[in-house]
């Protein structure tokens, strides 16, 4: 019997640690902390719906609806997506490394609900996620249907059609849709691709119920989420926060700001630059009102001495290189966009001509890729032209005003292989 | 933005680069390309409820489609087709089918529109 009292860490209302323990939990400690997983019946679908859980990978699709779409008499496949190709997000890795068993539990629960016999937990190759999962799987006997897959560390490799294509033996590149994975995915079977943090929440709802889940977050957006906070904060890292927490409090959980923050990048490299405001909260609604999106809760604070124009041009250059090079408008369009932004970042004589070209490039890129990559980058770049408007004007006039040119946003070297 | 083959506005919500240019002195703005002219007022009569669509992964910028139905397809600066976001008018049905058949990459198709 699960009751509210049994739920872990309920005493610290202000700092929920439902998902993310301080230290990695081995199976015995995990079982003590969370209790046993109850028998899963179809009624759980109802509870998931009542909980209001949405996908934690970035798109935010209602989980109950997704689970219902995959249920199949033919035998489905569950893919737990922990690939996290986003350079400013580390929350899936942190979750897997510290709470592997909760992720495994969630995958088992999802498999029950969609009647899947095969479960794959997909993680990136860098870091210790695969090892942590293998170690955890060796500690329990109820997860023989679970395997671990190490996916190429590419930005687009975790996109669900790319992931399915790779699991089917192809390159980790997005494919044309339809069919979507829930119709025909791994091995041709209906496939549930669900972020590992979503699955961890599913394992909690199975134990403690929808009311417990809703005790954190807001009425519209219940639950707690993992956020990766970096940039001009004293203690960058992954924190668990209730949805709806003011951005200032999110930063405070990470030791506070090191310098005055001129802008936040929220939602990673598909996300948006946003100006700091007391109204800004970590919720879908608040961020949408501010012209941004929640994404996978990656937050980068840009200090006042850095240059948003230069940062944006570096990231767009990186994202152009991360194109799977399958669609012309993505391959050539993002390259051209990066060229323009670099010229503006350099304050070159051609900066104004490059700026004038942005609009033309936008209409040649927008909505013309097979996946969200080109549109995601476009939205990110467009947000920079809004938020760093004054600095942009200074660049066009020939001078960057930033004092600190050390790179803030990471642009890792791409891995060679797509397989 | 009629010429970019989209059924909806771009995800950047219309607040793209265009809005950044407004009011910034000394910055020229470029008109987005418009394919096939603006003369589609009469196209609503006899609409076939079919629409040209391209699989961007298959497409390799041969450009035959833009040669065969320039009224519906224009090419971007890299030679990839931008398809007008509207149904194929009855008068262009044959040309549209010919373009689909002529695509060496089998990337062009006619989608039947559900209403």
Image (cartoon, coloured by chain):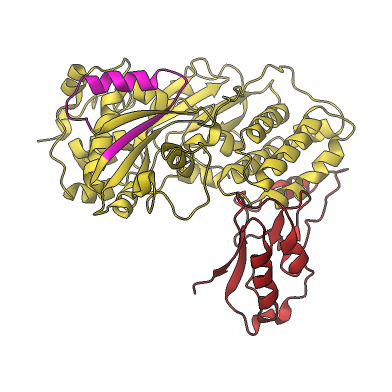
Colour displayed for chain A in the image of the structure:
yellow
In the rendered view, would you say B86 is above or below A166?
Answer: below
Along the viewing direction, whichever of B52 and B28 lies nearer the viewer: B52
Residue bounds of the magenta highlight: A118-144
Residue at image coords 36%, 25%? A95
The percent position of residue A62, horizontal first and vertical second, equals: 36, 49
> Eyeballing the image, is B90 above or below A230?
below
Rendered image quadrant of residue A335: top right
Q: Colour of chain B?
A: red
List x then y, in percent, for residue A195: 38, 37
Figure quadrant of the N terminus of chain A: top left
Vertical relation: A348 (above or below) A118: above
**Lateral position of residue A221 relative to residue A170, left or right:** left
Whether residue B53 is visible, yes or no, is yes
Residue A15 among magenta residues: no
Q: Is residue A221 visible?
A: no
Q: Is residue B72 left or right of residue A357?
A: left
């Amino acid at each position: 019997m699960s009751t509210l009292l049994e739920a872990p860490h309920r005493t610290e209302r202000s700092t929920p640690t439902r998902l993310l323990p301080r230290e990695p939990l081995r199976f015995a400690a995990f079982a003590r902390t969370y209790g046993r997983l109850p028998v899963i019946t179809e009624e759980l679908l109802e509870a998931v719906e009542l909980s209001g859980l949405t996908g934690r990978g970035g798109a935010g699709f209602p989980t109950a609806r997704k689970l219902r779409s995959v249920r199949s008499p033919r035998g489905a496949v569950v893919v737990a997506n922990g690939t996290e190709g986003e350079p400013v997000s580390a929350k899936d890795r942190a979750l897997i490394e510290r709470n592997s068993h909760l992720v495994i539990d969630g995958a088992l629960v999802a498999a029950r609900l969609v009647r899947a016999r095969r479960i794959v937990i997909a993680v990136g190759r860098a870091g210790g996620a695969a090892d942590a999962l293998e170690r955890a799987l060796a500690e329990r006997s109820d997860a023989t249907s679970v395997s671990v897959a190490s996916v190429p560390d590419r930005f687009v490799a975790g996109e669900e059609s790319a992931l399915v294509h790779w699991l089917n033996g192809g390159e980790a590149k997005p494919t044309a849709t339809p069919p979507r994975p829930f119709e025909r995915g791994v091995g041709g079977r209906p496939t549930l691709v669900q972020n590992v943090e979503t699955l961890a929440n599913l394992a909690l709802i199975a134990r403690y119920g929808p009311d417990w889940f809703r005790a954190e977050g807001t009425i519209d957006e219940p639950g707690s989420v993992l956020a990766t906070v970096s940039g001009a904060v004293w203690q960058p890292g992954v924190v668990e926060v209730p949805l709806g927490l003011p951005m200032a409090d999110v930063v405070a959980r990470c030791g506070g700001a090191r310098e005055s923050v001129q802008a936040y990048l929220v939602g990673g490299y598909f996300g948006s630059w946003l100006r700091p405001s007391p109204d800004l909260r970590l919720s879908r609604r608040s961020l949408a009102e501010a012209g941004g999106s929640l994404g996978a809760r990656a937050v980068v604070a840009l200090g006042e001495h850095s240059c948003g124009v230069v940062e944006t041009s570096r990231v767009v250059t990186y994202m152009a290189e991360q194109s799977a090079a399958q669609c012309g408008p993505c391959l050539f369009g993002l390259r051209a966009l990066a060229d323009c932004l670099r010229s503006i970042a350099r304050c070159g004589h051609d900066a104004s001509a490059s700026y004038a070209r942005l609009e033309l490039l936008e209409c040649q890129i927008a909505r013309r890729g097979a996946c969200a990559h080109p549109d995601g980058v476009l939205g990110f770049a467009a947000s920079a032209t809004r938020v760093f408007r004054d600095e942009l004007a200074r660049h066009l006039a020939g001078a960057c005003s930033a004092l600190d040119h050390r790179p803030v946003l990471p642009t890792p070297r791409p891995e060679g292989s797509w397989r | 933005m009629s010429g970019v083959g989209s059924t909806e506005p771009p995800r950047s919500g219309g607040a793209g680069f265009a809005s950044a240019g407004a009011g910034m002195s000394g910055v020229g703005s470029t008109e987005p390309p418009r394919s096939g002219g603006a003369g589609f007022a009469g196209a609503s009569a006899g609409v076939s409820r079919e629409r040209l669509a391209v699989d961007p992964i298959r497409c390799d910028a041969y450009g035959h489609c833009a040669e065969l139905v320039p009224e519906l397809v224009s090419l971007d600066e890299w030679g990839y087709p931008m398809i007008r976001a509207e149904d194929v008018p009855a008068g262009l049905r044959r040309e549209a089918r010919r373009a689909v058949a002529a695509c060496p990459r089998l990337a062009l198709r006619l989608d039947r529109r559900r209403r």
